[in-house]
Image (cartoon, rainbow, N blue to C red):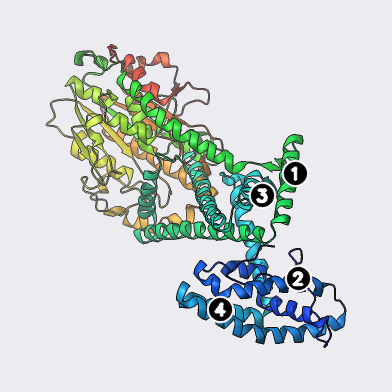
Amino acid sequence: MPVSTSTPSSPLPDSTDPEEAPAAPAAPTAQAEPAEEAARTANTADPGPAEATGEAGEAAGDAVEPAGDADVAAGDAGEAAVEISGDAAEAVGEAAAETAGDAAEPAEDDAAEGATDAAGGAGVVAEARWWRWRSRHPRAARVVWWTVTVLAFGLVLGALLLPNRIAGLEVNRFTRLPGEAIIGAALLLALPRRPRTVVAALGGVLLGALTVLNVLDMEFTEYLGRDFDLVLDWGLLDDAQSYVADSMGRATAVGAAVGLVLLVVLLSALMALAAVRISDLMARDTRRATRATLIAATAWVTCSVVGLQIAGMPVASHRSADTLVKKARQVRQTIKDEATFGKEVRHDTFGATPADQLVPDLRGKDMIFTFIESYGRSAIEDPVMAPGVDKTLGASTQALAKAGFHAKSGWLTSATYGGSSWLGHSTTLSGLWVDNQQRYRSVMASDHLSLTKAFRKTGAWDTVGVMPGIQKGWPEAKYYGLDKVYNAFEMGYQGPKFSWSTMPDQYALEAFQRLEHGRTDRDKPLMSEIILTSSHQPWAPIPKMVDWDSLGDGSVFEGIEKDGKKASDVIADGTASKEEYGKSIQYSVTALTQWLERYGTDDTVLVVLGDHQPIARVSGDNASRDVPISLVAKDPKVLDKIAGWNWTDGLKPAHNAPVWKMSAFRDKFLTAYGSTPHPTG
């Protein structure tokens, strides 16, 4: 069998478990000599620890080569010793082990001395100490050997079989035979020692990376309803850290980021060490390893052909290969999509429409487009959230009717899910399907007409944005055609943050009234885009409505925030998340409709919609991407223009109300209010 020249090899026959090797009698007979040799090497080297330190360096090889040759002889002696049985063999074996331990130490010390200059003194001294410990504690060494070996196999097989969905973490996913392991074993058996070690280590690092990708897929599916995009989604990790910092504090965010980086590095290192250990174990007995690989390959092919399953899962697995192929296709598709979408951006049905032919039927109206964060179909139809939300929608519809407002509602299918709200905003207002960051950047850099910019293009409206979630520069204002944007720091708020949300929706709406909508010196009507953020996850703590006249600078919310639930109490609890999410939607709807009752005029027209569904933990597995949309006005002529849309009366759309793609809304809205198409591109 192959023998390493840098450390002693196992004295046991390669087919023998270290626990099962009997000791040899110490009687002064010819049979005692092979027994003593077997006992000596049994106490100085087990397969596992030898492999863990056996390739300490090529330079140290010459110093310990005699020990390696002795081990070969010891291995043969061990085979003879196994045949000796009985109580006498066991008793004398202990004496032989003690003698072997004492005799082994000088040889090991000499080997360590020779290796010090070539491979570094500290490492070799540590190795020598390890060998001495093994010689004194053979049973503990065997336990360590088996533990490390089992963990190595478990890590590698687990990485090869790990699913990329949280729901897939079931026992039957890990009772399969991975074809990639068989191919990897065959490759390693065909390589010499040094290339074998390098390939095994690189393979382990690749398995670590694959594990990270599977975990990212799990989390992205849980939060955004899709897999992680290798090309586009790295930037979202920074957004995720910002979200954690805003929700749970900067210290938590920094600690989590550092911990994740260290975990990824540790995982890759452990995978590499595990793969190297397994490859070296196979190299000890290439004949047996080759036979086992052939048997496994035959079993895999047989199971694949006959379709053998365990608990509903095929035994023959190629899960990791499928993942790599899928990711490669995703990368190609992402690159190809950039060119394809560029053509869509250049084509614009209303791109060349003259200013006087854009939304002529809304001239003189104060137009407000409002997005409610995470306001999705589940809020209205899920049995946990729906009772409270539907009650609020019904009460708000009645209150608006008393104030002279009426509403019609339908559904839009959002381009995003669980997060990335800006994709929903841009899809609605651009009329393009913006479902990833690459498309978003393309649209923002284009001249494609946004719905809000159409109002500015006419010259008949002042345009303003109210963005309490914006806390840094926002160049997108140019694309949306907004003359003025109020960010989180420009509305005079001095109260507490509510987790991620910088201020309660009620305060943001009151600031909008004070700063823009309530101005009496305006000579044009106002077109506004407002983003309400109080229903942003983690939905704790949630603001409560206060008297409008007592809002002041927002300090009134101090006690409400202090008495509210903590994000950590809600964020990982599915039922609690649903309940608090429903309450946050009720709050946002109430704040908006009360503002409209209080400050709306005969010329106010409101379009309010959700940007996307909440995360899967709240909306449920396989939930739709639909969000409600409502148009509210006092002027009956405004609602008459959309009578052909067949939307439901009131703020709550019927279950079977029309469903459009979110990207269809811009053109339908412009057409309904008299805009004339003049295409470009």
Q: Are marks 2 and 3 in contact (CB under 8 Å)?
A: no
Question: Crowding at label 4, few (<14), some or many (≥20) Cα neighbours within 10 Å?
Answer: many
How far is mark 4 from mark 3, CA to CA? 44 Å
N-term-proximal mark, 2 vs 3: 2
Q: Is residue 571 above or below residue 600?
A: below
Q: Is residue 197 above or below residue 235?
A: below
N-term-proximal mark, 1 vs 2: 2
Question: Crowding at label 3, few (<14), some or many (≥20) Cα neighbours within 10 Å?
Answer: some
Mark 2: which amino acid? Answer: Asp
Find residue 325 and report its image quarter. Answer: top right
Say which residue appears at 28% left-offset and 43% top-offset.
470
At numbered mark 3, what does the secondary structure look like: helix, strand or loop?
helix
How far is mark 2 from mark 4, CA to CA? 23 Å
Name the residue tied to disc 4. Answer: 111
Residue 479 at x, y = what percent?
25, 30
Name the residue tied to disc 1. Answer: 299
> Toward the viewer: 607 or 557?
607
Question: Crowding at label 2, few (<14), some or many (≥20) Cα neighbours within 10 Å?
Answer: some
> Toward the viewer: 31 or 414?
31
Which label belongs to residue 76?
Answer: 2
Mark 1: which amino acid? Answer: Ala
Please identify, in this view, whether the residue under mark 3 or under mark 1 is nearer the observer: 1
Name the residue tied to disc 3. Answer: 174
Question: Crowding at label 1, few (<14), some or many (≥20) Cα neighbours within 10 Å?
Answer: some
Residue 117 at x, y = what percent?
45, 76
